[in-house]
Amino acid sequence: MTDKLVPNQKVAIQKVSSDDNEFYSSYIAAMEDDTISLATPMHGGSLVLFRVGEEIRVYTWPFMFVTEVLERCFVPHPLIIVRRPRVFTKNQRREFVRLDLSLPIIVRELKSGLAEPIGEEEVQTHTIDISGGGALLVYPKELPAGTWLELSVFLPEEVKCRAQVCRIEHNDTPKKVRLAVEFTDIAPSDQDKIIALIFRRQRELRRRGLL
């Protein structure tokens, strides 16, 4: 499964010993037989420091592996050298960080997962919460679980993906329901944009003492 790792591939790093569940964006700078060189991530304008011997989780959606920092390099570029993994874990959707966030979204119903819309109608609505793996959104009618959708989410930059309805939630608002959807076909770069937005908003909330 190590053929899933390639140079320049974007990854997210998490410290195993940390309690804040912070993720740091990085990428694979180089690969050797037994090691991987990861770009040292930045946070708040400074390098995130990792200790030699420290365990970290590396997310390469939809997989994750735990590894150890073997070495730190700063010239010519700041890198952390980690042990190349032998075991990967499938990253389940529930492991994505989810945040209450209202974002504009355009929804089009699709024919059984095909790219062809059912009709010309598109619904402009908004999310209630979102993660790298799915979203909860407001919708004007019930849709059966399993219904395929084409989504345009505005972060504000537009991210397009296909999704599938997982469940329906009812609330007190007449003529509206909540649809829980799972992203089934999304570019890794677009998924990274969603995750990065969530992390930025989380940092803002922490600074304001609201999280």
Image (cartoon, grey):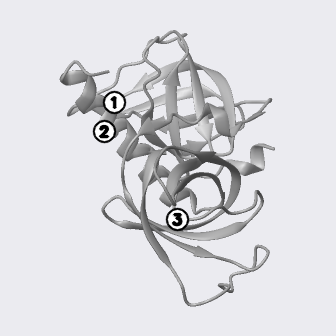
Q: Residue 134: horizontal and vertical position, in percent?
A: 58, 49
The label number, if any, that marks residue 83 in the structure image: none
Q: Are marks 3 and 1 in contact (CB under 8 Å)?
A: no
Q: Which residue is mark 1?
A: 74
Q: Residue furthest bottom?
A: 120
Report, in whole angstroms, how far the alpha carbon at label 2 lies from the one at label 1.
26 Å
Instruction: Assign a secondary structure to mark 3.
Output: loop
| Type of amino acid at the residue the image marks with label 3 | Pro
- Residue under label 2: 200
Whether residue 203 sits left or right of residue 105 in the image: it is left
Give above or below for 78 relative to 192: above
Mark found first going from the N terminus, 3 or 1: 1
Q: Residue at x 55, y 54 (%)?
A: 177
Question: Residue at horizontal 30%, vertical 37%?
Answer: 201
Q: Nearer the viewer, mark 3 or mark 2?
A: 3
Task: Compare residues 46 and 116 and report the one nearer the observer.
Answer: 116
Q: Amino acid at mark 1?
A: Phe
Q: Position of residue 154 (x, y in %)?
A: 37, 63
Task: Name the amino acid, label 2.
Answer: Arg
Residue 140, numbered label:
3
Identify the image quadrant of the N terminus. Answer: top right
In the figure, residue 112 lies in which quadrant?
Answer: bottom right
Answer whether residue 75 is visible to the viewer in this image. Answer: no
Please identify the quadrant where the C terminus is shown.
top left
State which tag comes first along the sequence, 2 or 1: 1
Look at the picture and state if 207 lies above or below 38: above
Q: Nearer the viewer, mark 2 or mark 1?
A: 2
